[in-house]
Amino acid sequence: MGGGVAEATLVEAALRVLNTADPFEKARLGDEIANKWLKGDIKVAYDASKDIQVPDRPSRGSNVKLVSPSEMPKLGKAGSLQSRQALVHSLVHTESWAIDLSWDIIARFGKQEAMPRDFFTDFVKVAQDEGRHFTLLAERLKELGSFYGALPAHDGLWDSAAATSNDLLARLAIEHCVHEARGLDVVPTTISRFRKGGDDKTAELLETVVYPEEITHCAAGVKWFKFLILRKGSKDKDVAVEEAEDDGRVNAEVIPKFHEIVRAFFRGPLKPPFNEVARKAAGFGPQWYQPLAVKD
């Protein structure tokens, strides 16, 4: 990569990640770019004079056989080595897409929506976390006697990204609130299954690294969804989202808009049970999702 990224904008650097096919290099490169941004070596988020073309679909390696979600084999409950391998493989694949999703929101929407610097920093941190999760889980999969690409996978996460490619509010609502929160719902059960299956090492990795960091990822989605709604009616274009809880507009405008968007872009009701503790920690209380858990 050389020193080129130091002179590039963050959006141009994000495109490097999206255009990198190998998932391990994607994670490594993303970590390098994230460190440069966080240390100030990349100083500018985007160049307003440049027309950046973001690919409809990020570059992906061909090492994973893709099937439709309905054709995916059952993952099991971690009672056997084969089931543990399948579960970890699924997690690795999810994290590989999470890397692309995090860099895509930066490249696709940051300049387009004139987002403040904190938006870029938040999603750089998310992208860096996802890359670390991918690398650690891929290493764990190797320790379990398998490798990323040994089993089929599906790309359902990117289907949602494609459907929200022209709407930052929808992208935040679906990918970075609904899907992230769904991950929070299922991780505790997954951790329990690994422990019952005698795999304390994988359980510990999920419990101490992945799970707490995923809460912050959902929080980023909630934070910036609020920001966009509140900014529309504010003279201050950099309205402080942290102060928004005192504003009745959150209940009057933000949450109803969230419900409207999810109903438009997400098929069917949200499925309980919900991890209320983790969702609350992310600022995603029941008033956001409970009304969406019933059929209209």
Image: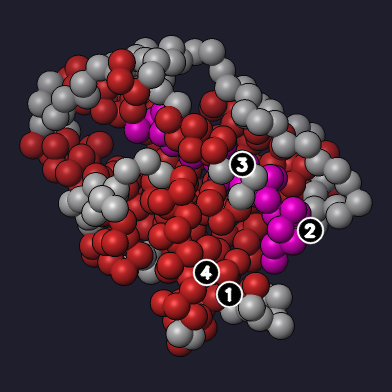
- In the picture, measured across the screen, residue 188 lies left or right of residue 262, that is left
Residue occupied by mark 2:
43
- In the picture, measured across the screen, residue 287 lies left or right of residue 57, that is left
Q: Is residue 275 above or below residue 256?
A: above
Residue 288: x and y, percent? Answer: 35, 65
Q: Identify which amino acid the numbered label 3 is placed on.
A: Ser
Residue occupied by mark 4:
226
Q: Identify which amino acid the numbered label 2 is placed on.
A: Lys
Give the mark nearest the N terminus, 1 or 3.
Answer: 3
Residue 82: x and y, percent? Answer: 20, 17
Residue 26: x and y, percent? Answer: 59, 31
Q: Identify which amino acid the numbered label 1 is placed on.
A: Leu
Q: CA distance from mark 1 to mark 2?
A: 27 Å
Q: Which residues are magenta?
A: 91-116
Single out the mark in the foreground, 4 or 2: 4
Residue drawn at x 78%, y 36% as measured from the top left: 53
Q: CA distance from mark 3 to mark 4?
A: 19 Å
Residue occupied by mark 1:
230
**Of residues 290 and 7, the one drawn nearer to the viewer in this rendering:** 290
Circles 1 and 4, Cβ within 8 Å, touching? The answer is yes
Secondary structure at badge 1 equals: helix
